[in-house]
Image: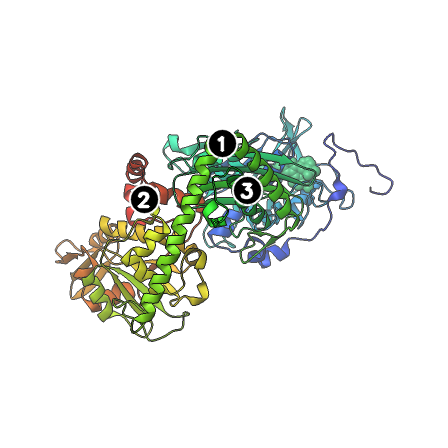
Amino acid sequence: MAKGKKIKKAEDAYNAESIKVLKGLSAVRKRPAMYVGTTGPRGLHHLVYEVVDNAIDEALAGYCKNIVVIIHKDNSITVKDDGRGIPVEEHPTEKKSALEVAMTMLHAGGKFDGKMYKVSGGLHGVGVSVVNALSEWMVVEVGRRKLLHRQRYSRGKPQGGVKKVGKVNASGTIVTFMPDKEIFDEVKFDRDLLSDRFQELAYLTPEVSITFIDERLKNADKRKQVFHYEGGVDAFVRQLNKNKDPLHPKPITFHTTGEDVHTDVSLQYTTGYSENIYSFANNINTTEGGTHLTGFKTAITKAVIDYALKSKLLKAETNLTGEDVREGLTAVISVRLRNPQFEGQTKTKLGNSELQGLVYSLVYDKLRDFLDETPRVSKKIVTKVVSAARSRAAARKARELTRRKTALESGTLPGKLADCSSQDTEVTELFLVEGNSAGGSAKQGRDRRFQAILPLRGKILNVEKARMDKILHNEEIGTIITALGCGIGDEFDESKLRYGKLIIMTDADIDGAHIRTLLLTFFFRYMKELINAGRVYIANPPLYRISYDKQQRYLFSEEELRTLVATLEEEQKYTLQRYKGLGEMNPEQLWATTMDPERRTIQQISIESAVKADKIFTTLMGDKVEPRRKFIEDHATEVRNLDV
Ligand code: 1YM
């Protein structure tokens, strides 16, 4: 407490003393990437998450029910909540308003004494002052004790003090900011990215309702979205399984609240084959997993095996693996803890060791209870798991067979593959090319030193509807696996990969889009690591060639064509060739437009959101026809650019 002067405590027991490590903001503007990762789109969106996280924390503390996020026409952002309002009282050591301290000093915040589950950490958690430092301007308004307070900032610097500007009935915080164009490459927010994240946050925080308004939209119906899911993780799993066939009608859901850790778990089996487990720690999607996920996996494996043995549904000699137990499983695990340790390449792996045992015993006990109490559902689950084990055994045999077969052949590589001479994955590329004629052009046009060509002619199996053993028997997929050399599923080993880039090159038509989607589905389900490592690309062949005045140009979109034709004079003659397929290009043209690293554009495939990617693949490739029809209708105009 400050000497000689007693700080009047707010009713909510805010203790300004807990604001500790303080530092100015100039460091943030000097090295923005240190604080928000990049000055590209990711870093830009990070600013919004940072502010929203503070409002979510206030909801978790039990004081806030509604959060509103607005993208204004000029791409400035407003985030509002109806919590207690950031404290405006004087800070004991800094001798200015706690609000100003929180907004202008690095690492200022009432939550560093570890008394709360601070949502932030890992990716986020740099504090709102960082957002302020990286904003051209910011305005913060606080409703507290019936008074409205306001302070403005420019590039992190206060423009005057905290002013009382009026009376209000409700308490809360409103932060409005304009990201600084001097810092960020482009200040333009991606509505889908933000709305996906808010939806996810709403599932993970059932106590809050998040309203998202995009004022840039002309269409009033689309402008506003409200996310509120009282069911929490249970509702999340139901949503994830919406286009799938559940094995039992209700997800199995449980929660625990302890002194130190809070957990929410929900799981539901489907008749499908893929495993969809999403784990979160303090609302951060832990895509690299960690201790909570390990605890969860060990628990379900043990619970299902123990139950199956006890109920005599399983013979003791049958070997069940964790992978068998997770076939067709959709699950969400969310934990909140005080001092999350985030590790891994992208800081999305939870490291706190105490979580493993904790999640293990919770999930084991609750799942055993559930299995014992609902034998009809349990039988379905065990039957499914046993059949997964059988298919895995068959797959193992098929794999051994493939291995032996390839070992006996002269080289080990498929005959259709035109390999490159370099073995350095820093430079090597494998083109997966639709059709034999395009494959021929690509083989002649390529730079054989580092470009390999694998023409695909047969039908590629829809892996969404097949099990591993069948997948391994499919000829086209077999050649891809052999050519890549890195194995699939649980045997995947990136160090054995033979090419640094995989480039899918298909025609710019519906069939091409279909083959592309089949290939992406395969990579997503069985070699996700390749996508995560940024190794999978889509080639971008031209749609037209236009010749005029002895000039030739290639055009890659209808838009480009329109623009160019508009610049031609009225009498100017031109001839236009439309490419219906890659096969219509000769080797030189294919090289010049689509393959030459100096001139081509290729689109890197990334998984911004695994939830969304899973949904796209289940919808496009799964069993249900109606959702697919609707998806294609809704996205008809984007077919050429299906990005996951
Ligand atoms: C639109 C963004 O930041 N809301 C918000 C922030 C705080 C509080 C309430 C709050 C926290 C505490 C006590 C506490 C913050 N306060 C601080 C600091 N919405 C938004 N709502 N009273 C109010 O943690 O003890 C940092 S964030 F540091 F000033 F206490």
How many numbered discs, if any? 3
- Horizontal relation, residue 161 to residue 320: left or right: right
Which residue does the image show at 74% across and 32% down from the upper left?
A: 10
- Disc 1 is placed on an element classified as helix
Q: What quarter of the picture does the N terminus occupy?
A: top right
Q: CA distance from mark 1 to mark 3?
A: 14 Å
Which residue does the image show at 39% across and 57% down from the upper left?
A: 396
Q: Amino acid at mark 2?
A: Met
Which residue has dot 2 on it? 621
- Disc 3 is placed on an element classified as helix
Q: Earlier in the sequence, mark 1 or mark 3?
A: 3
Question: Is residue 363 at least partly visible in the picture?
Answer: yes
* Badge 2: residue crowd in 10 Å (few <14, some 14–19, many ≥20): some
Q: By what rule are the colours in the image chosen?
A: rainbow
Does mark 2's beta carbon lie closer than 8 Å to ligand 1?
no
> Front-most of 401 and 64?
401
Q: CA distance from mark 2 to mark 3?
A: 34 Å
Q: Earlier in the sequence, mark 1 or mark 2?
A: 1
Which residue has dot 1 on it? 375
Q: Amino acid at mark 1?
A: Pro
Give the image location of residue 267, x and y in percent. Answer: 50, 38
* Badge 1: residue crowd in 10 Å (few <14, some 14–19, many ≥20): few
Q: Amino acid at mark 3?
A: Asp
Which residue has dot 3 on it? 306
Disc nearest the viewer among 2 and 3:
3
Q: Find residue 50 and report its image quarter.
A: top right
Vertical order, 108 against 239 (above or below): below
Q: Earlier in the sequence, mark 2 or mark 3?
A: 3
Ligand 1 resides in the quarter of the picture at top right
